[in-house]
Amino acid sequence: MRDLVGTVEREKAAIGVFVTLGKPTRDMKREAVSAGIYHSPGWNRDYPKIQILTTEQLLNREEIQMPPVRATFKKAKREAKREEVQEKLC
């Protein structure tokens, strides 16, 4: 858990997620809470900076608390249509 907190800080990541097979320990929870919160300026909401999810929670479709994703993709350049010329057969 401590490594995750350090990595999130070093990489200047907004949020880190720790996935565990079993229930998180009291120390794990304390470490996650001590990491603080992430404030999303775009959504004006706070999210836990470090979150702990169990595999059971993930299988039950519990989601990471994070701002909605606005995935944008670069549009492909339009090509001008070529006029097809039909050739005459002799």
Image: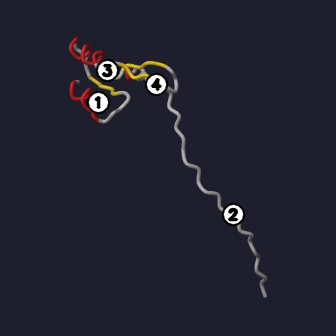
Q: Secondary structure at mark 4?
A: strand
Mark 3: which amino acid? Answer: Ile
Q: Secondary structure at mark 2?
A: loop
According to the image, label 2 marks what residue? 80
Q: Is residue 54 above or below residue 7?
A: above
Between discs 2 and 4, the one toward the N terminus = 4
Q: CA distance from mark 3 to mark 1?
A: 17 Å
Q: Residue at x 33, y 18 (%)?
A: 36
Q: Is residue 41 above or below residue 84?
A: above
According to the image, label 1 marks what residue? 9
Q: Is residue 4 above or below residue 85?
A: above
- Cβ–Cβ under 8 Å for marks 3 and 2: no
Q: CA distance from mark 3 to mark 2?
A: 51 Å
Seen from the viewer's position, the closer of residues 67 and 55 is 67
Mark 1: which amino acid? Answer: Glu
Mark 4: which amino acid? Answer: Ser
Between discs 3 and 2, the one toward the N terminus = 3
Q: Name the spot of residue 81 as percent of width and height, x first.
A: 71, 64
Between discs 4 and 3, the one toward the N terminus = 4
According to the image, label 4 marks what residue? 40
According to the image, label 3 marks what residue? 52
Between discs 1 and 2, the one toward the N terminus = 1
Q: CA distance from mark 1 to mark 2?
A: 48 Å
Between discs 4 and 1, the one toward the N terminus = 1
Between discs 3 and 1, the one toward the N terminus = 1
Q: Name the spot of residue 84 as percent of width and height, x first.
A: 74, 71
Q: Residue at x 38, y 29 (%)?
A: 14
Q: Name the spot of residue 73 as percent of width and height, x first.
A: 54, 45
